[in-house]
Amino acid sequence: MKALVVDDDLALADVLAFTLRRAGYEVVMAHDGAAALESFENEKPDILILDINLPKLSGLQVCQRIRAFADTPIIFLSVLGSEDDVVQGLKLGGDDYIVKPFSPRQLVARMEAVLRRSTDHVPQTGVIRSGDIELDPARNLLARSDTEPVRLTRLECRLMEVLLLNRGQVLPFDTLVDAVWGRSGGDRTALKQLVYRLRRKIEIDAGHPVLLISIPAVGYSLAS
């Protein structure tokens, strides 16, 4: 299992690399945002440990660019620990967010949880169709009759899959959390941010959704 560690604090990066190697990971390091993107393309890591405050490109910018074409798990590291900072990281595609200072052992445990969530789910074989929506879970592609196909991240595809298979039904928050992340991770805050990201891809106006509907105090439903 290969991990890409991106941090401009060279001492911390060395500590993280040492810890991860002891945990059995192959480690590649980068120390700025531009080098992170180059290493990601060349090394094709299984997971990315990404500082936010980086030279050249911020960690948030790196995440946005990677999420345009890949759903490799990303864990943010940052000294910025407010709720708004965490929410922004999750909105942009992070799978987890750890505030500095932290225990290296905690990081390894969180990495293992994220990697379990990324591999536990076995996608549907074949295309799922409902009305004008067509989802190909194997390729993370969503198509509608009136729009160009869009590529979803792994988590967005899981959420769309369970909504599509239960179209027209109201699915409780906790049911969706379990379906997307499993019982080992995820919560309602993460679900809210995932819905926000998915709506930006499937709704004409994400601020006024007509397809992925919120049911206050209950959950979400995909309109039939």
Image: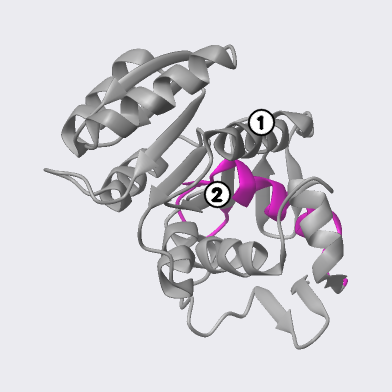
- Whether 208 is drawn above or below 110: the answer is below
Tell me if residue 4 can be seen: no
Q: Amino acid at mark 1?
A: Glu
- Pointer 1: what residue? 112
- Pointer 2: what residue? 96
Sequence-earlier tag: 2 or 1: 2
Q: Amino acid at mark 2?
A: Asp
x then y, percent, for residue 105:
59, 33
Compared across the picture, whether 193 is left or right of 74 comes to right
Quadrant in which residue 85 is drawn: bottom left
Q: Is residue 155 magenta?
A: yes
What SS does tag 1 mark?
helix
* View extreme (left): residue: 56
Tell me if residue 194 can be seen: yes
Compared across the picture, whether 11 is left or right of 177 comes to left
Q: Is residue 136 magenta?
A: no
Instruction: Identify the disc placed on residue 142.
Output: none
Q: Nearer the viewer, residue 154 or 120?
A: 120
Q: Which residues are magenta?
A: 144-169
State which quarter of the image contains the C terminus: bottom right
